[in-house]
Image (cartoon, grey):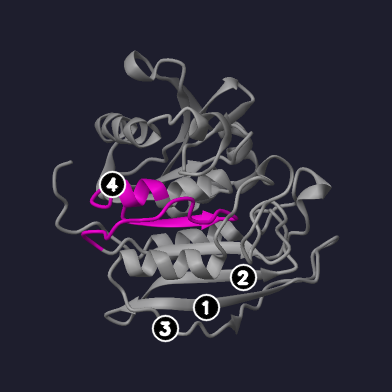
Amino acid sequence: MLQRVELSGEDSGRYYYAHVPPGESLPLVLALHGGGSTPLDMARFCHLAELSTRHRFAVVFPSGSGPSPEYLTWNAGICCGHASRREVDDVGFAARLLDLLLDRYDVNPARVYATGMSNGGMFCYRLAAALPQRIAAIAPVAGCLAFEPEPLPRVVPALHIHGTADHFVPYFGGGGARSLRQLEFPSVHDSLTQWAAACGLPTIDPQYQQIPYDRTLANDQPLDAHRAVYATQDGVDQVVEVRITGGGHTWPGEAPPWCFLGASPLGLSASELIWQFLAQFFCTNRSSE
């Protein structure tokens, strides 16, 4: 069951939903909603709360900001909307939220992760670049780099999931659809090579290996999924792409709420892939912020 918590003080007007199963020193996943969406929207379609019960991690769905309670965004750099235009200090908000969550719940500060959809995925990168000693690893979905990262003091592993037919944040870069039309996004390839470089990792030529998954579900789309590694360290894949050929601006494993977002492979769970990746990593040698 999700618990809604209203924030106060400097963050009055913001809130989060949390699902914290029983346990001690739990990993914590911040799940960031897309632009023009809400924390509850994110919780409903990614089903990370249900997954957290099975795998024993805490998940928190924080709110972005905006003039409408149903249309919230994150300041991820060049995107998106109200938060970007007004240069909202979402990194500061996230840092304060982490302090509160670590104080309120029995979670492990060395195992804090971030995932997100679209604008929320973009903010994963921004958050990890600003707080690399607090974010162990990230997993953006359908959200590219929206800023130029500076060199990081440690490697922050990243799993990036993206559809090749995404018309909102194009897989191959360029202008997006609808309200994102005026923006020029980097490609997935450029996003991942830049991230690897910021982490101080040499990139390798990505070799795409097909991911088998159950295609027998009713109404599923016949979409191919491939995994490619951009950078490794000590034999562990650190910067990884999952490419959904023909996939839209969607969260794999879930039907999109609107058909104009494009196709999604229902038999391939992005949430499961994300947790399998994130769970490998710890923040070692954490320093004070």
Q: Main secondary structure of the magenta part?
A: loop
In this view, the mark in front (3 or 1) = 3
Mark 3 and mark 4 lie on one chain; the one further toward the N terminus is 4
Tell me the kind of residue under disc 3.
Ile
Where does the magenta region start and end? 126-154
What residue is disc 4 on?
A: 131
Q: How would you rate the neighbour count of disc 2 (Cα within 10 Å): few for under 14, some for 14-19, many for 20 or more?
A: many
Whole-Å distance between the Cαs marked 1 and 4? 26 Å
Tell me, yes or no, if residue 112 can be seen here. Answer: no
Q: Quadrant of the C terminus?
A: top left
Whole-Å distance between the Cαs marked 3 and 4? 26 Å
Residue 204's mark?
A: 3
> Magenta segment: does it hold 144?
yes
In this view, the mark in front (2 or 3) = 3
Mark 2 and mark 1 lie on one chain; the one further toward the N terminus is 1
Regarding mark 3 in the picture, which secondary structure is present there?
A: loop
Quadrant in the rendering for residue 173: bottom right
Q: Residue at x 76, y 43 (%)?
A: 257
What residue is disc 1 on?
A: 228
